[in-house]
Amino acid sequence: IGHNLNEKIAQDRQRKEYEARVEQLLQDNPELAYLYSKAPNTEFDLDPGLASHVAPRTDPIIGDKSEQGPAKITLGPVAFQSDEHLIVALGHELVHATHYESGSYARWYDKYGFDTNGTRYAHLISEAFAYKWSTPYVNKFNLTGTFGGTETYNYYLSRLPKDFNFPK
């Protein structure tokens, strides 16, 4: 029991450090602050216990992805390797959160359905916007080994619905 208790205390301490870093970046980085202002009901699950291979993710809090509403962003150790990693991960996931909260994801979900591979077009559209935001940071910080850069962005652009007018 002593080992488990010590591990829980260490994780709680780490979670508080994660929260402080996210809060500081949301205050200091105007682009992150802007994104957060567009999804102010976003919740964060900052989990130091996540396995190192678990990527950051964003999910709706209530209902499923076909409904408009707030999102929950899950970030673990991958995102907290450095401030640069955190800027990229947080911004990318906040873009997704804005799509849930604004209802864009739900509208894309209803309008476009699935591609021929069975992937929901709403997912592809949201990823294209998220990579459009994060790719300049990935390239600037030289994080292409951790996060997809231009190649990943172009991949998502190539998979968008033909009638979707993606802003360049």
Image (cartoon, rainbow, N blue to C red):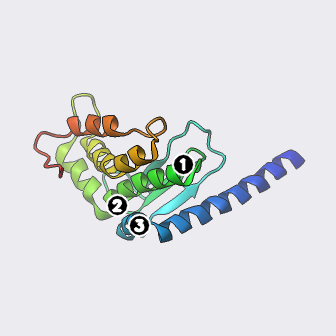
Name the residue nearer the viewer: 69 or 137: 137
Position of residue 43 in the picture relative to residue 115 (left or right): right
Question: What amino acid is at disc 3?
Answer: Tyr
Measured from the top left, where is residue 108 in percent x and y?
22, 50
Q: Earlier in the sequence, mark 2 or mark 1?
A: 1
Position of residue 31 in the picture relative to residue 52 (left or right): left
What residue did someone put label 1 on? 79
What residue did someone put label 3 on? 36
Q: Earlier in the sequence, mark 3 or mark 1?
A: 3
Q: Earlier in the sequence, mark 2 or mark 3?
A: 3
Q: Residue at x 54, y 51 (%)?
A: 75
Measured from the top left, where is residue 112 in percent x and y?
18, 44
Residue 20 picture quarter: bottom right
Q: Is residue 1 visible?
A: no
Position of residue 8 in the picture relative to residue 83 (left or right): right
Name the residue nearer the viewer: 155 or 98: 155
Nearer the viewer's eye, disc 2 or disc 1?
1
Q: Is residue 37 visible?
A: yes
Return the residue found at the far right: 2
Residue 107 picture quarter: bottom left
Say what secondary structure mark 1 lies in.
loop
Q: Residue at x 59, y 62 (%)?
A: 21
What residue did someone put label 2 on? 98
Q: In whole angstroms, how far apart are the C-alphas of marks 3 and 1?
A: 17 Å
Q: In whole angstroms, how far apart are the C-alphas of marks 2 and 1?
A: 19 Å
Nearer the viewer's eye, disc 2 or disc 3?
3
Question: What amino acid is at disc 2?
Answer: Thr
